[in-house]
Image: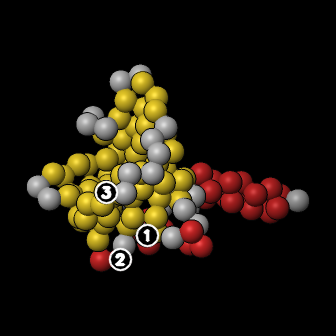
């Protein structure tokens, strides 16, 4: 019985320490909620697309901007650069389906991953 309990505790601890890697970031993410200076909005038609090789595309109301992205080695900072603008986001939370990032410029942004079928 003790080995079973120890195994359960180890599994619980490993799931708490889970963090997303660059590979899991690849794909299309839809912005579902933005909180900035206490104001909460639910933007429509706003996406981030992360591609292999650090390529990035930001889409808002049909307008598209291309750029670069990089996730820090400790998976705690996501940097997105479009043209001459570069923003470092603090990674608050993320897994394979949900991602929460924040910066002083944008506030807190919550994203959901879009399924491969709808890309």
Q: Quadrant of residue 90?
A: top left
- Which residue extends farthest top? 38
CA distance for labels 2 and 3: 21 Å
Q: Is residue 70 visible?
A: no
- Which residue extends farthest front? 62
Q: Position of residue 77 (x, y in %)?
A: 32, 52
Q: Are marks 1 and 3 in contact (CB under 8 Å)?
A: no
Q: How many marks?
A: 3
Q: Are marks 1 and 2 in contact (CB under 8 Å)?
A: yes
Helix, strand or loop at disc 2? helix
Q: Is residue 87 visible?
A: yes
CA distance for labels 1 and 2: 7 Å
Foreground label between 1 and 3: 3
Disc 2 marks which residue?
A: 52
Q: Position of residue 33 (x, y in %)?
A: 49, 39
Nearer to us in this view, 75 or 64: 64
Foreground label between 2 and 3: 3
Q: Position of residue 93 (x, y in %)?
A: 49, 47
Q: Say above or below: 99 vs 3.
A: above
Disc 3 marks which residue?
A: 63
CA distance for labels 1 and 3: 20 Å
Local packing at callout 1 (Cα closer than 10 Å; few below 14, some 14-19, many 20+) is: some
- Quarter holding the N terminus is bottom right
Disc 1 marks which residue?
A: 26
The structure residue drawn at horizontal position 36% and vertical position 52%, both measured from the top left corner, is 60
Q: Position of residue 28 (x, y in %)?
A: 46, 64
Q: Say above or below: 89 vs 97.
A: above
Q: Is residue 85 left or right of residue 37?
A: left
């Amino acid at each position: 019985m003790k080995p079973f309990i120890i195994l359960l505790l180890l599994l619980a601890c490993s799931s708490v320490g889970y963090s997303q890697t660059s590979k899991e970031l690849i794909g299309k993410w839809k912005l579902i909620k933005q909180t900035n200076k206490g104001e909460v909005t639910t933007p429509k038609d706003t996406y981030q697309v992360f591609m292999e090789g650090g390529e990035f595309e930001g889409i808002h109301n049909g307008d598209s901007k291309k750029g670069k992205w990089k996730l820090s080695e400790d998976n705690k900072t996501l940097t997105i650069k479009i043209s001459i603008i570069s923003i470092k986001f603090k990674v608050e939370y993320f897994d394979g389906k949900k991602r929460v990032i924040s910066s002083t410029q944008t506030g807190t942004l919550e994203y959901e991953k879009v399924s491969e079928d709808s890309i």
